[in-house]
Amino acid sequence: MNSLFITVEGIEGAGKSSNIAFTESLLRSHGHDLLLTREPGGTPLGEELRELLLGHTHDGMHDLTELLLMFAARAEHLHNKILPALEAGKWVICDRFTDATYAYQGGGRQLDTSAIATLENLVQGSRRPDLTLLLDLPVETGLARAAKRSEPDRFERQRLAFFQRVREAYLQIAHQQPERVKIIDASLELDLVQEQISNILTPFLAGRA
Ligand code: Z5A
């Protein structure tokens, strides 16, 4: 396989940052040329949209505005950054992608998932990630970890029930698409989480997946 599009997903405090760093060093040690990127963001325009989406300047933002801005940032990111990197043979690791929209805007905000699917098809055509690592853990554990870290952003201020719906939406996607979405028990110690990631990536690194 010449290129691979990997996304990493999970609720707050799931440990995406720590485990993306681990994944990056594992892939680099196997000689892969990588693009490490994130959503919302990843391009100059996308990073500006990220500030609007996560900051508190627009606390009353309508849920549909939020959905459309997520896909506006994604269109820019996918077409100007991710696809060119994949076409150049790079492996791409993206911190969140469209599964986050199904989880947060679909599950959390309870927007119509068929509207999300319409935007997904418009922006992405048939392009989907090749592999998604879903870091799953109880909401209470994730929020306790996240609370120790920094001031809450616009999403982190949501209530427990919101994040429970986000977690359930992620798990539903994983059960519907088990070939692509691999569930990782992120409640364990970091070395045990990384062992699971390593086991999932081994067939890809050996060219068997
Ligand atoms: N969003 C959306 O609504 N719709 C969309 O389509 C997209 C995004 C793409 C920004 O995402 C927000 O955008 C996000 C959803 C929304 N909501 N929020 N908030 P983000 O990815 O930038 O924000 P985040 O979820 O807060 O990610 P993060 O800051 O990168 O958190 P994390 O990576 O999951 O956690 P961490 O920083 O790696 O770990 C948290 C703490 O736990 C830290 O102190 C670690 O040392 C510790 N940790 C990590 N693993 C362990 C283990 N195994 N044991 C014990 N402690 C651990």
Image (cartoon, rainbow, N blue to C red):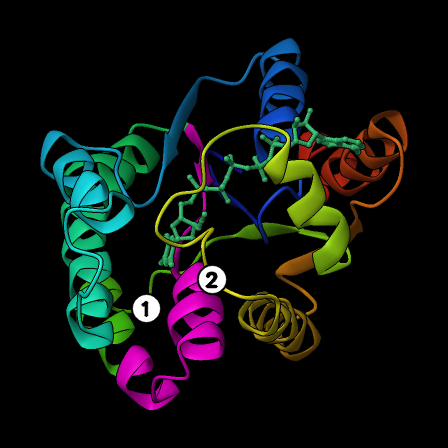
- Comparing 12 with 43, the one in front is 12
Residue at image point 45% right, 41% down: 152
- Comparing 29 with 45, the one in front is 45
Image-quadrant location for residue 193: top right
- Comparing 87 with 26, the one in front is 26
Ligand 1 visible in quadrant: top right
Q: Is residue 104 above or below residue 196?
A: below
Q: Amino acid at mark 2?
A: Gln
Task: Identify the magenta region.
Answer: 91-117
**Crowding near pointer 1: few (<14 within 10 Å), some, many (20+)?**
few
Let me know if residue 102 is in the magenta part.
yes
On screen, residue 105 versus residue 28, left or right, reads left
Let me know if residue 151 is in the magenta part.
no
Q: What is the x, y in percent for residue 123?
A: 19, 64
* Residue bearing mark 2: 158
CA distance for labels 1 and 2 = 32 Å
On screen, residue 79 versus residue 150, left or right, reads left
**Does residue 209 show up?**
no
Q: Is residue 31 above or below residue 18?
A: above
Asked if the beta carbon under badge 1 is closer than 8 A to the nearest atom of ligand 1, the reply is no
On screen, residue 88 versus residue 193, left or right, reads left
Lower position in the chain sequence, tag 1 or tag 2: 1
The numbered mark at residue 192 is none
Image-quadrant location for residue 15: top right
Q: What is the x, y in percent for residue 104?
A: 44, 66
Q: Amino acid at mark 1?
A: Ser
In this rendering, the label closer to the viewer, 1 or 2: 2
Residue at image point 50% right, 29% down: 150
Q: Is residue 156 above or below residue 171?
A: above
Q: Callout 2: helix, strand or loop?
A: loop
